[in-house]
Amino acid sequence: MAALGQSRLDQHESRDAGPAAVAEHRDAVSHVLRVLDTIPDNQQEVIRLKFQNGFSYREISRVTGLSESNVGFLIHTGLKTIRERIATKAATK
Amino acid sequence: MKPDTNDPRLTAYALGELDGAERAAVESQLAGCAASRRAVEEIRQLAASLAEDLRKEPCPALTDLERLTIRTQLQSPQRGWRFAWGPMALAACVLVAIAVYVFQHVGQTPQVAQNGRPAVPPKVVAQPDQTPDAPQKPNFVRRKKAGGAGSPMDDAGDSSEMAVDKGPGDAEKTEPAPEPTPTPETPTPADTAVATAFRPNSTRVDSVDDASWIDQLVESVWEENSIKPSSPATDGEFIRRAYLDIVGHVPPAEKAEAYIRSRERDKKVKLIKELLNSDTYGPYWAGIWSNHLVGRRPGARNVDRDSLQKYLRDSFAENKPWNKLVYELVTATGGSTPESVQAGVPFNGATNFLMAHMNDQAVPATAFTTRLFLGVQVQCTQCHDHPFNDRKQESFWGMNAFFRGLRRQEHNDVNDVGRRRFLFAELTDREPGDDLFVRFDKRNGFVEVTPPRLLDGRKFEEPVPEMNLRQELGKFIVSPKNEYFAQAIVNRMWAHFLGRGIVHPMDDLGEHNPPSNPELLERLAEHFKESNYDLKRLIAWITLSKPYSLSSQTNDSNKEDDQYFSHYPLKQLSPEQMFDSIMVATKADRIGAKSWEDAPRLKNNLLRQFTIAFNNDENAEADTFNGTVPQALFLMNGDLMSRAISMNSGSYLRESVDQILEQQRKSRGKARSGDIELLNDLYLSAVSRYPNQRETKLAAMLLQDTLASSKDKDPIAGYQDIFWALLNSSEFVLNH
């Protein structure tokens, strides 16, 4: 796969939700997702691929180019951090 | 040594990613360590809530299709002859799109996708698909690789098809697919050119194809589920259901008798051919589709149901290919009634379909078109994103935009007393203006816009000269690459004959609603496409298949089965079938009874009685012949029934009984064979079988009683009772 040039990126329409959809979503965003936003981006990325799109480790590894064990490690670490942060928050309440 | 609860393998195990030795190792760790078990449980809980919350997120927008495509590519190393280039190209596009997404979202993680090339070749450490605990992926996806010749919506422009030069075995190679050319977002008419030069099909069916592949696919599912199918139906049952399902009424007594007595080995094939070639085939299917397209009571929009029905009757009679028929319905222009010809506007009965649904900004037209022809439910996304699948409000309004150019012009004349009289309506398309966009309200009060957008995501943002949006939509719908199109109709036909779709409900296809036998659905759709969308051939495959020939009586192993077609379903006759069956059973058409001269009016009355129209924005209606008290009363002593069993002169019973009496007068003293003949005839007419011994005995007793109490030795009241009882039996009102 060749490198993705800036000019091509500029031509590509963003797949992000529009402002309206974002506003609508913000009303309903859950606690877990707020915590998810606080972990490192690479962990967020694989977690989203895993749970939002339902891909397996192997599929994520193909999509991202990471090794499967790396994917497993990132997901494990990400989930662990989320669990800890949720637990801390619950404890401080 | 204390087990490590911070082991990535525990997470992988909890998420169903382990198998073989690793899985066994973790399981033995769990058996001896409560903390590990707790950790696994916590991970599973978190995974569940993450999956649930993330699914509701508006971004990133990977559609069902994109996900499916990635999977199809990744999971099926040997796709063999069924491999198509389309999905491969699309998958490559999706990979680019994901790379873009990754760029935007994790720009600061260079190891992820700085150049889209994996830093290290992926190492296979787990085979998630073979793990028993693997997260449940929809059945549809897992089985897809067996027969999936491309994804439903991969008609993404021809240029993308040329972009990939790799073969089917790609998935196991470490190099990802080369970069494809991005899918053009705004196709011109030339891009979307689909073979709209339709080929005709043979009108008559002279031979039938071998469809034993259906039996094999269905039997393998029975085996998988340890189901023993019901025994074969009797000849009487088979001819009755074939008549009801293919031409809409019970078989005439003599046809049933001949079929039951026939010893020919290919009598089934002969029967199906005869029915498909019969004159009543066209009208029956035209009736069914008129109901689907405009309903039994099309309301006050001057929709001419008769003209539509005539168009459909001709189309079904000539066995028009299904893709041609649908294309004509979606793109119809012209006058709605034959009156239009005098005004110089070509008459086209097909225009009545869209005219019936142009209210409310053509919202019903959008919903009907996608539901009937693609088996896709978009109507609930009119007001909000779909709660159970990935469809967004934009997909509804994007489809709706194709109908916004519709223009309906009424032509009236004024009669002698100055009253306006409707002549016809003309359906045309407005020239698209500069702005093709449609505005719609989000639930939160925002107003959004969308251009005409097909369900596969292609958009038409700029008006192109000479472009006709409805034709573009029509091409998309009937495109051979649009798998929903063939799947929707084969599933609908299967449901017509077997009582339930392979996908159920039959018009809600999609990944959220997996088929009960995915390979069957795919193969049927594939063969249907190869047959040039030939409905008669499709009907022959289904009606000559094993599941269609089974008894409706269940056994211990299949009494719970309602989705694998291991027994014939009990189906309520539709009001139309009921009426036509009574006409055939009473031989009204042949003895020319005076009492039936106004049959068409009676039929309409009957249909109204059993149809409830919901005046909602989807113009939906339902027939409700389901045994309510008024309906039972109608059958017991309604006008239709009292005519059916009438003793007045000219009625079927009167004529038959008079014949018997005549015979008896001639052959006084001899055995009264006429009695048993008429009794047989009544049974064959109503329930397509001979009376059994017990029934014959009871009938004889009843007839004797009647004769004894009748002054002029007229047995007609006895026959009348028997016929009434037969027409009111559940054996008559059910297709079994």
Image (spheres, grey):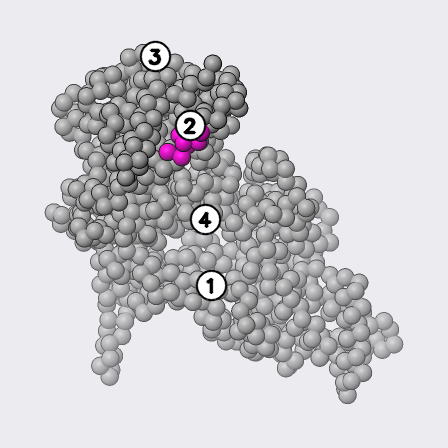
Front residue (pair B403, B135): B135
Q: Which residue lies furthest to the left in this view?
A: B434
Badge 2 or badge 3: first in the primary sequence: 2
Q: Does dot 2 land on a helix, a strand or a loop?
A: helix
Q: Distance between the residues labelled 3 and 4?
A: 44 Å
Is residue A26 among the parts visible in the rendering?
Answer: yes
> Where residue A37 sits in the image (x, y, percent)?
24, 32
> Where residue B361 sits in the image (x, y, percent)?
23, 57
Q: What stretch is highlighted in magenta?
A: B38-46
Badge 3 or badge 1: first in the primary sequence: 3
Q: Which of marks 3 and 1 is in front?
A: 3
Q: Which of marks 3 and 4 is in front?
A: 3
Does the magenta run of residues contain B462? no
Q: Which chain carries label 1?
A: B
Asked if both marks, 1 and 2, belong to the same chain, the answer given is: yes
Is disc 1 in contact with disc 2, using a CB cutoff of under 8 Å?
no
Q: Is residue B205 left or right of residue B9?
A: right
Q: Distance between the residues labelled 1 and 4?
A: 17 Å
In the rendered structure, which amino acid carries the disc numbered 4?
A: Met
Q: How far apart are marks 4 and 2 (CA)?
A: 43 Å
Is disc 3 in contact with disc 1, using a CB cutoff of under 8 Å?
no
Which residue is tagged 4?
B506
Q: Mark 4 lies on which chain?
A: B
Which residue is tagged 3?
B121
Badge 4 or badge 2: first in the primary sequence: 2
The image quarter in which residue B340 lies: bottom left
